[in-house]
Image (cartoon, rainbow, N blue to C red):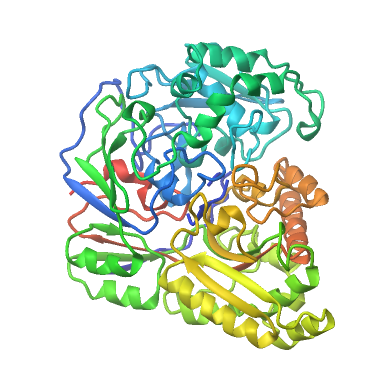
Protein backbone atom coordinates (compact mmCIF):
# COMPACT_ATOMS: atom_id res chain seq x y z
CA UNK A 1 0.00 0.00 0.00
CA UNK A 2 1.43 3.38 -0.98
CA UNK A 3 0.25 6.72 0.35
CA UNK A 4 1.44 10.02 -1.10
CA UNK A 5 1.66 12.89 1.37
CA UNK A 6 0.22 16.28 0.50
CA UNK A 7 2.29 19.43 0.38
CA UNK A 8 2.10 21.69 3.39
CA UNK A 9 3.16 25.32 3.72
CA UNK A 10 4.93 25.70 7.03
CA UNK A 11 5.67 29.26 8.08
CA UNK A 12 6.47 28.73 11.76
CA UNK A 13 9.63 30.01 13.29
CA UNK A 14 14.99 26.14 13.50
CA UNK A 15 17.67 24.10 14.45
CA UNK A 16 19.26 20.80 12.96
CA UNK A 17 21.13 14.00 8.66
CA UNK A 18 22.22 14.11 6.35
CA UNK A 19 23.39 17.02 8.41
CA UNK A 20 21.13 18.94 10.69
CA UNK A 21 20.54 22.65 9.96
CA UNK A 22 21.20 24.52 13.07
CA UNK A 23 6.26 26.67 22.26
CA UNK A 24 3.60 27.02 24.65
CA UNK A 25 0.09 25.61 24.79
CA UNK A 26 -1.67 22.42 25.75
CA UNK A 27 -0.96 18.87 24.65
CA UNK A 28 -2.46 18.15 21.26
CA UNK A 29 -2.02 14.41 21.41
CA UNK A 30 0.24 14.17 18.37
CA UNK A 31 3.60 13.69 20.01
CA UNK A 32 4.94 12.93 23.43
CA UNK A 33 1.69 13.69 25.22
CA UNK A 34 1.80 14.85 28.82
CA UNK A 35 1.21 13.50 32.26
CA UNK A 36 -1.31 15.21 34.49
CA UNK A 37 -0.08 13.94 37.83
CA UNK A 38 3.65 13.53 37.23
CA UNK A 39 3.43 9.88 38.26
CA UNK A 40 6.26 7.70 37.02
CA UNK A 41 5.64 4.55 34.99
CA UNK A 42 7.89 1.82 33.69
CA UNK A 43 6.25 2.10 30.26
CA UNK A 44 6.59 -0.66 27.73
CA UNK A 45 4.16 -3.37 26.80
CA UNK A 46 4.24 -2.46 23.12
CA UNK A 47 6.86 -5.00 22.09
CA UNK A 48 10.17 -4.54 20.31
CA UNK A 49 10.21 -2.14 17.36
CA UNK A 50 13.25 -2.21 15.07
CA UNK A 51 14.17 0.76 12.89
CA UNK A 52 16.54 0.16 9.97
CA UNK A 53 19.04 3.03 9.84
CA UNK A 54 21.93 3.49 7.45
CA UNK A 55 24.28 5.80 9.32
CA UNK A 56 25.70 4.84 12.72
CA UNK A 57 25.78 7.44 15.49
CA UNK A 58 29.11 9.05 16.46
CA UNK A 59 28.36 10.76 19.78
CA UNK A 60 25.72 10.87 22.53
CA UNK A 61 25.98 14.69 22.47
CA UNK A 62 24.35 15.93 19.25
CA UNK A 63 24.69 19.61 20.23
CA UNK A 64 28.34 20.12 19.25
CA UNK A 65 29.53 21.21 15.84
CA UNK A 66 30.97 17.84 14.84
CA UNK A 67 28.15 15.98 16.59
CA UNK A 68 25.56 17.79 14.48
CA UNK A 69 24.42 14.80 12.43
CA UNK A 70 20.94 13.42 11.92
CA UNK A 71 22.31 10.04 12.98
CA UNK A 72 23.08 11.50 16.42
CA UNK A 73 20.05 13.73 16.94
CA UNK A 74 17.66 11.01 15.75
CA UNK A 75 19.19 8.45 18.11
CA UNK A 76 18.90 10.79 21.12
CA UNK A 77 15.74 12.68 20.12
CA UNK A 78 13.75 11.20 23.02
CA UNK A 79 16.72 10.66 25.35
CA UNK A 80 17.96 14.25 25.83
CA UNK A 81 14.95 16.48 25.39
CA UNK A 82 13.63 19.98 25.98
CA UNK A 83 10.66 22.32 25.91
CA UNK A 84 9.66 21.74 22.27
CA UNK A 85 10.04 19.36 19.35
CA UNK A 86 9.09 19.20 15.69
CA UNK A 87 5.65 17.65 15.83
CA UNK A 88 3.20 16.48 13.19
CA UNK A 89 3.72 18.22 9.87
CA UNK A 90 7.00 19.68 11.13
CA UNK A 91 5.24 22.17 13.41
CA UNK A 92 6.98 23.40 16.54
CA UNK A 93 5.12 21.60 19.31
CA UNK A 94 5.38 22.19 23.08
CA UNK A 95 6.65 19.30 25.20
CA UNK A 96 4.60 19.89 28.34
CA UNK A 97 6.14 16.84 29.98
CA UNK A 98 9.39 18.81 30.15
CA UNK A 99 7.87 22.12 31.20
CA UNK A 100 6.27 25.26 29.84
CA UNK A 101 7.24 28.66 28.45
CA UNK A 102 5.60 31.95 27.66
CA UNK A 103 6.42 35.42 26.39
CA UNK A 104 6.20 37.70 29.42
CA UNK A 105 7.30 40.89 27.65
CA UNK A 106 7.44 41.87 23.99
CA UNK A 107 9.79 44.87 24.27
CA UNK A 108 12.36 43.69 25.01
CA UNK A 109 11.34 40.19 23.97
CA UNK A 110 11.44 38.14 27.17
CA UNK A 111 10.54 34.47 27.51
CA UNK A 112 10.17 32.61 30.81
CA UNK A 113 10.80 28.86 30.91
CA UNK A 114 9.59 26.66 33.75
CA UNK A 115 10.82 23.10 34.19
CA UNK A 116 8.20 20.56 35.23
CA UNK A 117 8.39 20.27 39.02
CA UNK A 118 9.28 16.57 38.71
CA UNK A 119 11.77 16.98 35.87
CA UNK A 120 14.95 15.10 36.74
CA UNK A 121 17.71 13.20 35.03
CA UNK A 122 17.30 9.44 35.19
CA UNK A 123 20.01 9.28 37.87
CA UNK A 124 17.74 11.34 40.14
CA UNK A 125 19.46 14.73 39.74
CA UNK A 126 16.86 17.51 39.30
CA UNK A 127 16.87 19.38 35.99
CA UNK A 128 17.19 23.04 36.92
CA UNK A 129 18.96 26.37 36.42
CA UNK A 130 22.44 24.79 36.31
CA UNK A 131 21.48 22.82 33.21
CA UNK A 132 19.90 25.93 31.69
CA UNK A 133 23.06 28.01 32.18
CA UNK A 134 25.27 25.33 30.66
CA UNK A 135 22.89 25.25 27.69
CA UNK A 136 22.93 29.07 27.43
CA UNK A 137 26.71 29.40 27.40
CA UNK A 138 27.01 26.63 24.79
CA UNK A 139 24.15 27.46 22.44
CA UNK A 140 25.02 31.16 22.54
CA UNK A 141 28.70 30.51 21.84
CA UNK A 142 29.67 32.38 25.01
CA UNK A 143 32.17 29.74 26.09
CA UNK A 144 34.10 27.33 23.90
CA UNK A 145 31.80 24.30 24.30
CA UNK A 146 31.39 24.04 20.47
CA UNK A 147 28.03 24.69 18.85
CA UNK A 148 26.73 24.16 15.29
CA UNK A 149 25.18 27.64 15.34
CA UNK A 150 24.08 30.11 17.97
CA UNK A 151 20.52 30.56 16.69
CA UNK A 152 19.69 33.83 18.45
CA UNK A 153 20.94 32.90 21.93
CA UNK A 154 24.16 34.82 21.24
CA UNK A 155 22.10 37.99 21.57
CA UNK A 156 20.43 37.34 24.92
CA UNK A 157 21.24 38.16 28.52
CA UNK A 158 22.46 35.48 30.88
CA UNK A 159 19.45 33.98 32.68
CA UNK A 160 19.30 35.30 36.25
CA UNK A 161 18.70 32.12 38.22
CA UNK A 162 20.39 30.00 40.85
CA UNK A 163 21.16 26.34 41.36
CA UNK A 164 17.95 24.52 42.23
CA UNK A 165 15.68 27.07 40.52
CA UNK A 166 13.04 25.52 38.28
CA UNK A 167 12.48 28.72 36.31
CA UNK A 168 14.71 30.88 34.12
CA UNK A 169 14.13 33.81 31.79
CA UNK A 170 15.72 34.66 28.45
CA UNK A 171 15.75 38.34 27.48
CA UNK A 172 16.62 39.17 23.86
CA UNK A 173 18.66 42.30 23.21
CA UNK A 174 17.18 42.58 19.70
CA UNK A 175 13.97 41.17 18.21
CA UNK A 176 14.31 37.55 17.11
CA UNK A 177 11.80 36.05 14.70
CA UNK A 178 12.60 32.42 15.57
CA UNK A 179 12.52 32.82 19.36
CA UNK A 180 10.35 29.75 19.86
CA UNK A 181 12.86 27.43 18.18
CA UNK A 182 15.78 29.17 19.92
CA UNK A 183 14.83 27.80 23.34
CA UNK A 184 15.91 24.37 24.57
CA UNK A 185 14.36 21.64 22.46
CA UNK A 186 15.04 18.11 21.29
CA UNK A 187 17.88 17.00 19.05
CA UNK A 188 20.84 19.31 18.49
CA UNK A 189 19.37 22.02 20.72
CA UNK A 190 18.77 19.87 23.78
CA UNK A 191 19.88 20.47 27.37
CA UNK A 192 22.84 18.38 28.54
CA UNK A 193 23.46 17.20 32.13
CA UNK A 194 25.48 19.92 33.86
CA UNK A 195 26.19 17.76 36.90
CA UNK A 196 27.96 15.18 34.72
CA UNK A 197 29.97 17.88 32.93
CA UNK A 198 31.00 19.40 36.26
CA UNK A 199 32.06 16.09 37.77
CA UNK A 200 34.02 15.04 34.69
CA UNK A 201 35.55 18.52 34.54
CA UNK A 202 37.13 18.13 37.97
CA UNK A 203 34.78 20.58 39.69
CA UNK A 204 33.48 20.04 43.20
CA UNK A 205 29.85 20.29 42.06
CA UNK A 206 27.51 21.76 39.48
CA UNK A 207 27.22 24.76 41.84
CA UNK A 208 30.87 25.54 41.10
CA UNK A 209 30.08 25.42 37.37
CA UNK A 210 27.33 27.99 37.79
CA UNK A 211 29.58 30.19 39.97
CA UNK A 212 32.24 30.28 37.24
CA UNK A 213 29.67 31.26 34.62
CA UNK A 214 28.21 33.98 36.82
CA UNK A 215 31.66 35.37 37.60
CA UNK A 216 32.10 36.48 33.99
CA UNK A 217 31.45 40.20 33.50
CA UNK A 218 28.82 39.88 30.81
CA UNK A 219 28.68 43.03 28.67
CA UNK A 220 25.59 43.62 26.54
CA UNK A 221 26.24 47.23 25.55
CA UNK A 222 27.69 46.49 22.09
CA UNK A 223 26.70 44.14 19.26
CA UNK A 224 27.41 40.51 20.14
CA UNK A 225 30.15 40.11 17.52
CA UNK A 226 32.08 43.04 19.05
CA UNK A 227 31.62 42.26 22.74
CA UNK A 228 34.49 41.62 25.09
CA UNK A 229 33.08 39.91 28.16
CA UNK A 230 35.39 40.31 31.13
CA UNK A 231 36.76 37.10 32.55
CA UNK A 232 36.02 34.82 29.59
CA UNK A 233 39.60 33.51 29.43
CA UNK A 234 39.62 32.88 33.18
CA UNK A 235 36.29 31.03 32.93
CA UNK A 236 37.50 28.87 30.04
CA UNK A 237 40.71 28.08 31.91
CA UNK A 238 38.73 27.05 34.99
CA UNK A 239 36.42 24.95 32.83
CA UNK A 240 39.08 23.53 30.51
CA UNK A 241 38.54 19.93 31.60
CA UNK A 242 34.77 20.34 31.56
CA UNK A 243 34.84 21.85 28.06
CA UNK A 244 37.07 19.06 26.80
CA UNK A 245 34.68 16.47 28.23
CA UNK A 246 31.66 18.23 26.69
CA UNK A 247 33.29 18.04 23.25
CA UNK A 248 34.86 14.59 23.41
CA UNK A 249 33.69 12.69 26.50
CA UNK A 250 30.48 11.45 24.90
CA UNK A 251 32.01 10.32 21.60
CA UNK A 252 31.00 6.78 20.68
CA UNK A 253 34.30 4.99 20.13
CA UNK A 254 33.22 1.40 19.64
CA UNK A 255 31.42 1.29 22.98
CA UNK A 256 29.00 3.31 25.09
CA UNK A 257 30.32 5.84 27.57
CA UNK A 258 29.91 4.74 31.17
CA UNK A 259 26.24 4.50 32.15
CA UNK A 260 26.71 7.23 34.78
CA UNK A 261 27.72 9.69 32.05
CA UNK A 262 24.57 9.34 29.93
CA UNK A 263 21.48 9.97 32.07
CA UNK A 264 18.19 10.54 30.26
CA UNK A 265 15.75 13.45 30.41
CA UNK A 266 13.17 11.86 28.13
CA UNK A 267 10.92 8.81 27.85
CA UNK A 268 13.76 6.62 26.54
CA UNK A 269 17.26 5.89 27.76
CA UNK A 270 20.12 3.99 26.18
CA UNK A 271 19.90 0.27 26.91
CA UNK A 272 22.78 -1.24 24.94
CA UNK A 273 24.99 -0.69 21.93
CA UNK A 274 26.81 -3.12 19.65
CA UNK A 275 29.26 -1.25 17.42
CA UNK A 276 28.44 -1.69 13.76
CA UNK A 277 25.28 -3.59 14.61
CA UNK A 278 22.64 -1.81 16.66
CA UNK A 279 21.65 0.68 19.34
CA UNK A 280 18.83 -0.27 21.72
CA UNK A 281 16.71 2.30 23.54
CA UNK A 282 14.51 1.24 26.46
CA UNK A 283 11.87 3.11 28.48
CA UNK A 284 13.28 5.46 31.09
CA UNK A 285 11.74 4.01 34.25
CA UNK A 286 12.43 7.27 36.10
CA UNK A 287 10.58 9.42 33.58
CA UNK A 288 7.91 11.60 35.19
CA UNK A 289 5.82 12.09 32.05
CA UNK A 290 3.88 9.88 29.68
CA UNK A 291 5.86 6.63 29.35
CA UNK A 292 7.11 5.14 26.10
CA UNK A 293 4.78 2.52 24.67
CA UNK A 294 7.36 0.06 23.29
CA UNK A 295 9.39 -2.36 25.39
CA UNK A 296 12.41 -1.30 23.35
CA UNK A 297 13.27 0.45 20.10
CA UNK A 298 16.26 -0.96 18.25
CA UNK A 299 18.23 1.08 15.70
CA UNK A 300 19.59 -1.65 13.39
CA UNK A 301 22.51 -0.26 11.40
CA UNK A 302 22.06 -1.69 7.95
CA UNK A 303 22.96 -0.50 4.46
CA UNK A 304 20.13 1.12 2.57
CA UNK A 305 20.20 -1.41 -0.25
CA UNK A 306 19.69 -4.24 2.27
CA UNK A 307 16.84 -2.65 4.22
CA UNK A 308 13.94 -3.71 2.01
CA UNK A 309 14.99 -7.35 2.25
CA UNK A 310 15.39 -6.95 6.01
CA UNK A 311 11.86 -5.52 6.22
CA UNK A 312 10.49 -8.41 4.19
CA UNK A 313 12.29 -10.91 6.44
CA UNK A 314 10.98 -9.27 9.62
CA UNK A 315 14.49 -8.26 10.73
CA UNK A 316 13.36 -4.61 10.86
CA UNK A 317 9.91 -3.05 11.21
CA UNK A 318 10.46 0.50 9.95
CA UNK A 319 12.72 2.12 7.38
CA UNK A 320 12.95 5.68 6.06
CA UNK A 321 15.69 5.54 3.43
CA UNK A 322 16.73 7.93 0.71
CA UNK A 323 14.27 7.03 -2.04
CA UNK A 324 14.95 5.54 -5.44
CA UNK A 325 12.54 4.21 -8.01
CA UNK A 326 13.91 0.68 -7.68
CA UNK A 327 13.53 0.77 -3.92
CA UNK A 328 10.03 2.20 -4.18
CA UNK A 329 8.99 -0.58 -6.56
CA UNK A 330 10.58 -3.20 -4.34
CA UNK A 331 8.77 -1.96 -1.24
CA UNK A 332 5.42 -1.73 -3.01
CA UNK A 333 5.72 -5.38 -3.92
CA UNK A 334 5.95 -6.48 -0.28
CA UNK A 335 2.88 -7.77 1.53
CA UNK A 336 2.01 -6.56 5.01
CA UNK A 337 3.95 -3.31 4.46
CA UNK A 338 2.75 0.27 4.23
CA UNK A 339 4.72 2.69 2.04
CA UNK A 340 4.45 6.46 2.02
CA UNK A 341 6.15 9.06 -0.18
CA UNK A 342 6.01 12.60 1.15
CA UNK A 343 7.55 16.09 0.99
CA UNK A 344 10.21 16.98 3.53
CA UNK A 345 12.61 19.73 4.55
CA UNK A 346 15.65 17.90 3.22
CA UNK A 347 17.64 18.88 0.18
CA UNK A 348 20.80 17.80 -1.61
CA UNK A 349 23.59 20.29 -2.24
CA UNK A 350 27.11 20.51 -3.62
CA UNK A 351 29.29 22.65 -1.35
CA UNK A 352 32.73 24.04 -2.22
CA UNK A 353 35.81 23.93 0.02
CA UNK A 354 37.02 27.48 0.74
CA UNK A 355 39.90 26.34 2.95
CA UNK A 356 42.12 24.66 0.36
CA UNK A 357 42.16 23.18 -3.13
CA UNK A 358 41.51 24.62 -6.59
CA UNK A 359 38.14 26.16 -5.69
CA UNK A 360 39.26 27.87 -2.50
CA UNK A 361 40.42 31.10 -4.14
CA UNK A 362 39.07 30.84 -7.67
CA UNK A 363 35.54 32.07 -8.32
CA UNK A 364 35.90 31.37 -12.09
CA UNK A 365 36.63 27.68 -11.42
CA UNK A 366 33.67 27.47 -9.05
CA UNK A 367 31.50 29.08 -11.73
CA UNK A 368 32.71 26.57 -14.31
CA UNK A 369 31.78 23.68 -12.05
CA UNK A 370 28.40 25.24 -11.31
CA UNK A 371 27.76 25.43 -15.06
CA UNK A 372 28.65 21.79 -15.73
CA UNK A 373 26.57 20.37 -12.86
CA UNK A 374 23.81 18.27 -14.48
CA UNK A 375 21.09 19.32 -12.04
CA UNK A 376 18.15 18.57 -14.36
CA UNK A 377 19.68 15.22 -15.30
CA UNK A 378 19.98 14.28 -11.62
CA UNK A 379 16.33 15.08 -11.03
CA UNK A 380 15.14 13.36 -14.22
CA UNK A 381 17.08 10.15 -13.56
CA UNK A 382 17.10 9.83 -9.79
CA UNK A 383 14.25 11.81 -8.23
CA UNK A 384 11.38 12.21 -10.71
CA UNK A 385 10.82 8.44 -10.98
CA UNK A 386 9.97 8.57 -7.26
CA UNK A 387 8.21 11.95 -7.23
CA UNK A 388 6.85 12.82 -10.70
CA UNK A 389 6.46 16.49 -9.70
CA UNK A 390 10.09 16.90 -8.58
CA UNK A 391 11.98 19.93 -9.88
CA UNK A 392 15.52 21.27 -9.63
CA UNK A 393 15.91 23.34 -6.47
CA UNK A 394 17.17 26.88 -7.04
CA UNK A 395 17.95 28.35 -3.61
CA UNK A 396 19.72 27.01 -0.54
CA UNK A 397 17.90 29.44 1.77
CA UNK A 398 14.31 29.06 0.56
CA UNK A 399 12.50 25.74 0.45
CA UNK A 400 9.75 24.90 -2.08
CA UNK A 401 7.48 24.32 0.92
CA UNK A 402 8.00 27.97 1.87
CA UNK A 403 5.33 30.34 0.52
CA UNK A 404 8.01 32.80 -0.60
CA UNK A 405 10.17 30.28 -2.51
CA UNK A 406 9.21 31.44 -6.02
CA UNK A 407 9.75 35.09 -5.14
CA UNK A 408 13.23 34.36 -3.77
CA UNK A 409 14.23 32.31 -6.83
CA UNK A 410 12.92 34.96 -9.24
CA UNK A 411 14.98 37.62 -7.45
CA UNK A 412 18.21 35.68 -6.94
CA UNK A 413 18.88 32.88 -9.47
CA UNK A 414 21.45 34.05 -12.07
CA UNK A 415 20.38 33.17 -15.60
CA UNK A 416 23.79 31.64 -16.37
CA UNK A 417 23.24 28.94 -13.73
CA UNK A 418 19.60 28.20 -14.40
CA UNK A 419 20.50 25.42 -16.84
CA UNK A 420 23.54 23.26 -17.46
CA UNK A 421 26.10 24.83 -19.81
CA UNK A 422 28.95 22.48 -20.74
CA UNK A 423 30.33 24.81 -23.40
CA UNK A 424 30.28 27.76 -21.01
CA UNK A 425 32.12 25.74 -18.38
CA UNK A 426 34.81 24.69 -20.88
CA UNK A 427 35.23 28.29 -22.06
CA UNK A 428 35.97 29.40 -18.49
CA UNK A 429 38.49 26.59 -18.01
CA UNK A 430 40.24 27.51 -21.24
CA UNK A 431 40.34 31.20 -20.29
CA UNK A 432 41.80 30.27 -16.88
CA UNK A 433 44.28 27.81 -18.46
CA UNK A 434 42.72 25.23 -16.13
CA UNK A 435 41.56 22.44 -18.45
CA UNK A 436 42.40 19.15 -16.73
CA UNK A 437 42.07 20.52 -13.19
CA UNK A 438 41.51 17.58 -10.84
CA UNK A 439 38.51 17.92 -8.51
CA UNK A 440 37.91 15.73 -5.46
CA UNK A 441 34.15 15.06 -5.34
CA UNK A 442 33.28 13.29 -2.09
CA UNK A 443 30.09 12.04 -0.48
CA UNK A 444 28.54 9.29 1.66
CA UNK A 445 28.49 5.83 0.13
CA UNK A 446 24.98 4.76 -0.90
CA UNK A 447 23.37 3.72 -4.20
CA UNK A 448 21.69 7.01 -5.05
CA UNK A 449 24.75 9.15 -4.30
CA UNK A 450 26.98 6.78 -6.25
CA UNK A 451 24.74 7.25 -9.28
CA UNK A 452 24.65 10.98 -8.63
CA UNK A 453 28.43 11.24 -8.44
CA UNK A 454 28.91 9.34 -11.67
CA UNK A 455 26.50 11.62 -13.55
CA UNK A 456 28.36 14.70 -12.25
CA UNK A 457 31.72 13.19 -13.14
CA UNK A 458 30.59 12.40 -16.70
CA UNK A 459 29.26 15.92 -17.25
CA UNK A 460 32.12 17.88 -15.69
CA UNK A 461 34.79 15.68 -17.27
CA UNK A 462 33.21 16.57 -20.60
CA UNK A 463 33.56 20.25 -19.69
CA UNK A 464 37.30 19.84 -19.05
CA UNK A 465 37.62 18.96 -15.38
CA UNK A 466 39.07 15.66 -14.20
CA UNK A 467 36.66 14.64 -11.45
CA UNK A 468 37.96 12.18 -8.89
CA UNK A 469 34.74 10.83 -7.42
CA UNK A 470 34.77 8.75 -4.25
CA UNK A 471 31.97 7.80 -1.84
CA UNK A 472 32.94 6.78 1.69
CA UNK A 473 31.01 5.09 4.46
CA UNK A 474 32.85 7.24 7.02
CA UNK A 475 32.22 10.51 5.17
CA UNK A 476 30.46 12.02 8.23
CA UNK A 477 32.75 10.46 10.85
CA UNK A 478 34.70 12.68 13.26
CA UNK A 479 37.81 12.22 11.10
CA UNK A 480 35.94 11.80 7.81
CA UNK A 481 36.27 13.92 4.69
CA UNK A 482 33.41 16.32 5.52
CA UNK A 483 34.72 17.57 8.87
CA UNK A 484 38.41 17.54 7.92
CA UNK A 485 37.81 19.30 4.56
CA UNK A 486 39.40 16.56 2.47
CA UNK A 487 37.34 17.45 -0.58
CA UNK A 488 36.97 20.13 -3.21
CA UNK A 489 33.23 19.59 -3.62
CA UNK A 490 31.15 17.74 -1.04
CA UNK A 491 27.70 16.34 -1.71
CA UNK A 492 25.40 15.97 1.27
CA UNK A 493 21.88 16.60 2.43
CA UNK A 494 20.74 19.31 4.83
CA UNK A 495 17.85 18.28 7.04
CA UNK A 496 15.91 21.22 8.39
CA UNK A 497 12.52 22.80 8.95
CA UNK A 498 10.58 25.96 8.14
CA UNK A 499 12.69 28.02 10.56
CA UNK A 500 15.12 30.65 9.24
CA UNK A 501 17.57 30.06 12.08
CA UNK A 502 17.97 26.50 10.81
CA UNK A 503 20.01 27.55 7.77
CA UNK A 504 21.28 30.92 8.95
CA UNK A 505 24.48 29.86 10.70
CA UNK A 506 25.46 27.63 7.76
CA UNK A 507 26.72 30.68 5.88
CA UNK A 508 28.06 32.80 8.76
CA UNK A 509 31.81 33.30 9.06
CA UNK A 510 33.09 30.48 11.31
CA UNK A 511 35.22 31.05 14.38
CA UNK A 512 37.86 28.78 12.87
CA UNK A 513 37.99 26.22 10.09
CA UNK A 514 38.04 23.10 12.25
CA UNK A 515 35.59 20.31 13.01
CA UNK A 516 34.59 21.95 16.29
CA UNK A 517 34.96 25.59 15.19
CA UNK A 518 33.22 25.85 11.83
CA UNK A 519 29.70 25.09 13.01
CA UNK A 520 27.40 24.28 10.08
CA UNK A 521 29.70 26.17 7.69
CA UNK A 522 31.53 23.07 6.47
CA UNK A 523 33.23 24.79 3.55
CA UNK A 524 34.48 27.64 5.80
CA UNK A 525 33.06 30.37 3.54
CA UNK A 526 33.27 33.96 4.82
CA UNK A 527 31.67 37.22 3.69
CA UNK A 528 31.31 40.14 6.12
CA UNK A 529 28.47 41.74 4.12
CA UNK A 530 26.55 38.48 4.17
CA UNK A 531 27.16 38.12 7.93
CA UNK A 532 25.34 41.43 8.44
CA UNK A 533 22.39 40.31 6.30
CA UNK A 534 22.17 37.02 8.18
CA UNK A 535 21.77 38.97 11.40
CA UNK A 536 19.20 41.33 9.92
CA UNK A 537 16.94 38.56 8.60
CA UNK A 538 16.62 37.06 12.08
CA UNK A 539 15.20 40.35 13.31
CA UNK A 540 12.78 40.92 10.42
CA UNK A 541 9.21 40.73 11.68
CA UNK A 542 7.71 42.19 8.50
CA UNK A 543 7.08 39.47 5.89
CA UNK A 544 8.02 41.61 2.88
CA UNK A 545 11.27 42.69 4.54
CA UNK A 546 12.06 39.07 5.40
CA UNK A 547 11.55 37.90 1.81
CA UNK A 548 13.65 40.77 0.47
CA UNK A 549 16.52 39.91 2.81
CA UNK A 550 16.33 36.18 2.04
CA UNK A 551 16.40 37.03 -1.67
CA UNK A 552 19.50 39.18 -1.21
CA UNK A 553 21.20 36.42 0.79
CA UNK A 554 20.34 33.87 -1.88
CA UNK A 555 21.72 36.16 -4.58
CA UNK A 556 25.07 36.57 -2.78
CA UNK A 557 25.42 32.83 -2.23
CA UNK A 558 24.89 32.25 -5.94
CA UNK A 559 27.28 35.03 -7.02
CA UNK A 560 30.00 33.89 -4.60
CA UNK A 561 29.62 30.26 -5.67
CA UNK A 562 29.20 28.90 -2.15
CA UNK A 563 26.82 25.97 -2.30
CA UNK A 564 24.71 24.76 -5.20
CA UNK A 565 21.23 23.39 -4.46
CA UNK A 566 20.51 20.25 -6.46
CA UNK A 567 17.08 18.92 -5.51
CA UNK A 568 14.71 18.24 -2.65
CA UNK A 569 14.64 14.75 -1.26
CA UNK A 570 11.16 13.31 -1.37
CA UNK A 571 10.75 11.37 1.83
CA UNK A 572 9.91 7.69 1.73
CA UNK A 573 9.04 5.47 4.64
CA UNK A 574 7.89 1.88 4.90
CA UNK A 575 6.79 -0.09 7.91
CA UNK A 576 5.19 -3.35 8.92
CA UNK A 577 1.44 -2.87 9.10
CA UNK A 578 1.24 -4.38 12.59
CA UNK A 579 3.25 -1.46 14.02
CA UNK A 580 1.06 1.39 15.23
CA UNK A 581 1.52 5.16 15.13
CA UNK A 582 4.27 5.43 12.51
CA UNK A 583 3.82 8.89 10.94
CA UNK A 584 6.38 10.38 8.52
CA UNK A 585 7.51 13.94 9.23
CA UNK A 586 8.92 16.59 6.86
CA UNK A 587 11.25 18.18 9.44
CA UNK A 588 14.65 17.11 10.78
CA UNK A 589 13.00 15.11 13.57
CA UNK A 590 12.64 12.47 10.86
CA UNK A 591 10.52 9.36 11.36
CA UNK A 592 11.26 9.24 15.13
CA UNK A 593 9.37 12.44 16.05
CA UNK A 594 6.62 10.43 17.82
CA UNK A 595 8.66 7.33 18.66
CA UNK A 596 7.26 7.16 22.24
CA UNK A 597 3.91 6.17 20.68
CA UNK A 598 5.24 3.31 18.55
CA UNK A 599 3.80 -0.04 19.56
CA UNK A 600 3.13 -3.39 17.98
**Image position, residue 8 (x, y; %):** 49, 58
In the rendered image, the vertical position of residue 156 relative to residue 217, given as above or below? below
Q: Quadrant of residue 211?
A: top right
In the rendered image, the vertical position of residue 91 relative to residue 218, given as above or below? below
**Residue 288 shows up from this direction:** yes
**Image position, residue 32 (x, y; %):** 34, 37
Closer-to-camera residue (403/156): 156
**Image position, residue 17 (x, y; %):** 47, 54
Position of the N terminus, as image quadrant, is: bottom left
Residue at x 52%, y 37% (from the top left corner): 189
Residue at x 29%, y 41% (from the top left corner): 596
Q: Is residue 338 left or right of residue 72?
A: left
Closer-to-camera residue (146/103): 146
Q: Quadrant of residue 257?
A: top left
Q: Is residue 310 left or right of residue 108?
A: left
Query: How many circles with numbers are drawn on the protein?
Result: 0
Residue at x 26%, y 48% (from the top left corner): 298
Closer-to-camera residue (593/522): 522
In the rendered image, the vertical position of residue 194 relative to residue 429, given as above or below? above
**Residue 569 shows up from this direction:** no
Residue at x 64%, y 61% (from the top left corner): 396
Q: Is residue 168 left or right of residue 369?
A: left
Q: Is residue 539 left or right of residue 147?
A: right
**Image position, residue 519 (x, y; %):** 62, 45
In the rendered image, the vertical position of residue 583 relative to residue 358, given as above or below? above
Amino acid sequence: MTRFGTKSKLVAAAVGGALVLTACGSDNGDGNGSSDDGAQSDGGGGGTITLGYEQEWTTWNATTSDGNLSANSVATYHVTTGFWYFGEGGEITPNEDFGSYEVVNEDPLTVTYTFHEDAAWSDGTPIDCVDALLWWTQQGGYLDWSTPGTGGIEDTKMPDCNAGDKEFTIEYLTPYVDWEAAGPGHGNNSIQPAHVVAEQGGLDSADELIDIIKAVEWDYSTPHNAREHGGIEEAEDALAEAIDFFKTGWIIDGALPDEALIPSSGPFTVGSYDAGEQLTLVPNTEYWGTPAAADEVVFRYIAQDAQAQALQNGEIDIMAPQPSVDLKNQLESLSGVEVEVYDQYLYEHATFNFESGPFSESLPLREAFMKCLPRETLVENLIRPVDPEAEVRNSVVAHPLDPYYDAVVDASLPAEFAEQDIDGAREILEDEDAVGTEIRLRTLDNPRRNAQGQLIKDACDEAGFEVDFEAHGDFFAQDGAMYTNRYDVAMAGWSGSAVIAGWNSTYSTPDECSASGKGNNNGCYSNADLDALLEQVLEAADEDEKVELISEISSILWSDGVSVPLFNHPGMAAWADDVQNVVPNPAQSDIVWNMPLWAR
